[in-house]
Image (cartoon, coloured by chain):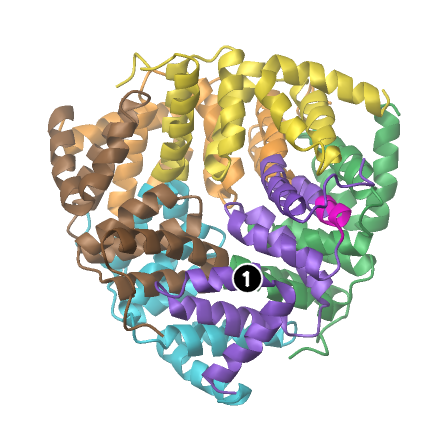
Chain colours: A brown, B purple, C cyan, D yellow, E green, F orange
Amino acid sequence: MNREDRYKHGMQVLEKVDGEAGQRIVDSLSDVSPELGHQVVAWAFGDMYARPELTPRDRQLVTLGVLAALGGCEIELDVHINAALNVGLVPSEIAEALLHTAVYAGMPRSINATLVAKKVFGERGLLPVSNLG
Amino acid sequence: MNREDRYKHGMQVLEKVDGEAGQRIVDSLSDVSPELGHQVVAWAFGDMYARPELTPRDRQLVTLGVLAALGGCEIELDVHINAALNVGLVPSEIAEALLHTAVYAGMPRSINATLVAKKVFGERGLLPVSNLG
Amino acid sequence: MNREDRYKHGMQVLEKVDGEAGQRIVDSLSDVSPELGHQVVAWAFGDMYARPELTPRDRQLVTLGVLAALGGCEIELDVHINAALNVGLVPSEIAEALLHTAVYAGMPRSINATLVAKKVFGERGLLPVSNLG
Amino acid sequence: MNREDRYKHGMQVLEKVDGEAGQRIVDSLSDVSPELGHQVVAWAFGDMYARPELTPRDRQLVTLGVLAALGGCEIELDVHINAALNVGLVPSEIAEALLHTAVYAGMPRSINATLVAKKVFGERGLLPVSNLG
Amino acid sequence: MNREDRYKHGMQVLEKVDGEAGQRIVDSLSDVSPELGHQVVAWAFGDMYARPELTPRDRQLVTLGVLAALGGCEIELDVHINAALNVGLVPSEIAEALLHTAVYAGMPRSINATLVAKKVFGERGLLPVSNLG
Amino acid sequence: MNREDRYKHGMQVLEKVDGEAGQRIVDSLSDVSPELGHQVVAWAFGDMYARPELTPRDRQLVTLGVLAALGGCEIELDVHINAALNVGLVPSEIAEALLHTAVYAGMPRSINATLVAKKVFGERGLLPVSNLG
């Protein structure tokens, strides 16, 4: 595959996982660092997300853990909480995954990520989250 | 103690330490992750803060160090700088504690935390901070 | 449940998830901070891991993401890569989960966590990992 | 040098590197932690930035790497992306440096820092960045 | 004060707080980065630790919180747990401070820091820690 | 380019920058996560390091900043301090770059990275570092 093919392939994966939210991040980079946008699409999605060794649902569980733990990733959590819903995780599972991060990354990381989930769930009419505690 | 008793006990500790600001965070979680709100109250405050091995004032000094060092904890710093004032630390001690974090966590973490302190002190009519450098 | 019951309940969960490795960490804390050992067992396992909202396998995927992202958690990764195997993740899925963290947390965090996986897999006769790359 | 001389010397270095943006941070600290403002000027700039062992341009490349990797340093990145331009780095080099951080610190840190660069470049009429990708 | 005076002043503060352990770190830097050793002594101790706005005991509580939260600071925790003992914190207070960090920085950071405390307490004949949980 | 070509191209870049040390990391991954080894070579080196927008020397300055700031990257710092020497940075510049990180990431990150530099410089007969402090 040449550079353009790799981008097209990655964009197909990105659209399935992240939908419009992922596209918006790539667009926002186009006038400052088109190469970063290219790498997000061609590498992160085309090379990494596309691999069949983990299901998309499993992959989002790992992603939620990483982003919550890092902190300061509110933009990316927004995209990937949407993505988690897109690939079959339900709100109570997402909330539980973010609750679980409190054990290892502490309460602030867990609270901050959960408040992003609240925003995303609200935008998609999924509040209140049921079947929890 | 059953689950409800643990929550009530934790809420008593939380009210003494964090006042309204802590309550607001718990409330904000109620429709997305009530269990996270429960754990903040029942575990973090009921089990951990309630322990007599450190005074509340000592505990807030540790908390300020941790939150400043983590970064991305502006919401929690707001709560806990208020808490620090509630348990007897004076503004110049809080500012000095946050200054001290610069040695180990660097200038940006120290500056960011200090700007949260500025906001809290301003809201409580405690600016300018006296007896400093 | 009283304090002792909460500990017993947590220990049952810990044994199922972490096996001996988790017990060793708790033991290592007994003469310096028995309360930390108690909280790991009674809270992290008894309260948090025991919740049915996520399967143990899902929970370990989140845990691997968090621990890899935090860095400096080699001791805990050792325990939880063992735990991941105990709850049904296979080596190629674990390796893939840790590979995936490279996208969000960078190559060093991914490499360091993968080298812990190599150690654990080696101890359990699971090298080389097949069905990869 | 006495305390005041060290401050004056540091302010001369700060003005050359950071311009007005650095001054604004120091000013914002004046009523809450004048000592932190003093240390930023007298120590960080007067003692550290002033050293001839690295050129100002080299120093900003290191700074960009550190600030992007830490995360949560948007205020400081704003100052130091301006500083990078002031000491001779061109927009495509800055964008490339921030792209490079993705390898080691992951995509979110790189994207967040790049979006700060976009803001700074926009304010200085430097968009779109040419000679990239 | 000139450069040499600042160093001498800092060394007096360092000796009081950190004792031999701090000196060993400075010595280890002498052939690779004598300026870093100088800054640790002249700035971190001479300028920052020497300030009277916080007692040495309070300052160590903040330091323990920062170092535990950062992770990967085992060398520095060793020095500063010794320092904490030198300035009047007792083992049960230190263990409690490190336990407290679990709430905000998660269990792994708390466990890792506590295991450094175990090492230091063991070297000083202070195990087992009494009056805990 | 196909997958194999991308790997070969990346390996040529890696050999020029990292020499044997980089190869050893890739080899150590071969039985646990050959895909991670592939991505380090084909993506990090073939796609990212190969780009001409920054000189190799500039790129290593950014890399040193990122790795020092992240913490827990001793393995990678070893490789990249060697790489920094390979692409033309001299020991006093590397030591100064790591000293500079203290301003933004704090003393412990700076000290830990500098001690890795001491090890690398020692192995290459470059101690003591001259023209410092």
Task: Examine the image and state in which quarter residue A62 appears.
Answer: bottom left
- Answer whether residue B91 is magenta in the image: yes
Q: Is residue D68 left or right of residue F32?
A: right
Of residues B16 and B76, the one drawn nearer to the viewer in this rendering: B16
Question: Residue placed at 82% from the left, 37% from the top?
Answer: E46
Is residue F97 among the parts visible in the rendering? yes
What quarter of the picture does the C terminus of chain A occupy?
A: bottom left
Q: Is residue A27 left or right of residue A108?
A: left
Q: Position of residue D81 (x, y in %)?
A: 48, 21
Q: Is residue A81 left or right of residue E99?
A: left
- Answer whether residue A7 is magenta in the image: no
Crowding near pointer 1: few (<14 within 10 Å), some, many (20+)?
Answer: many
* Magenta segment: B90-96
SS of the residue at dot 1? helix
Of residues B133 and E76, the one drawn nearer to the viewer in this rendering: B133
Q: Main secondary structure of the magenta part?
A: helix
Q: Position of residue A70 (x, y in %)?
A: 43, 48
Q: In the image, what residue type sits under mark 1? A: Gly
Question: Residue placed at 65% from the left, 21% from the top?
Answer: D49
Task: Examine the image and state in which quarter residue C47 appears.
Answer: bottom left
Task: Examine the image and state in which quarter residue B132 appears.
Answer: top right
Q: Is residue C58 above or below residue C102?
A: below
Q: Position of residue A52 (x, y in %)?
A: 15, 51
Q: Position of residue C94 (x, y in %)?
A: 28, 58
Q: Is residue B91 above or below residue E133?
A: above
Q: Is residue A117 left or right of residue E50?
A: left
Instruction: Chain letter for mark 1, please.
Output: B
Q: Which residue is mark 1?
A: B22
Q: Is residue C15 above or below residue F50?
A: below
What quarter of the picture does the N terminus of chain A occupy?
A: top left
Of residues E49 and F4, the one drawn nearer to the viewer in this rendering: E49
Is residue F46 among the parts visible in the rendering? no
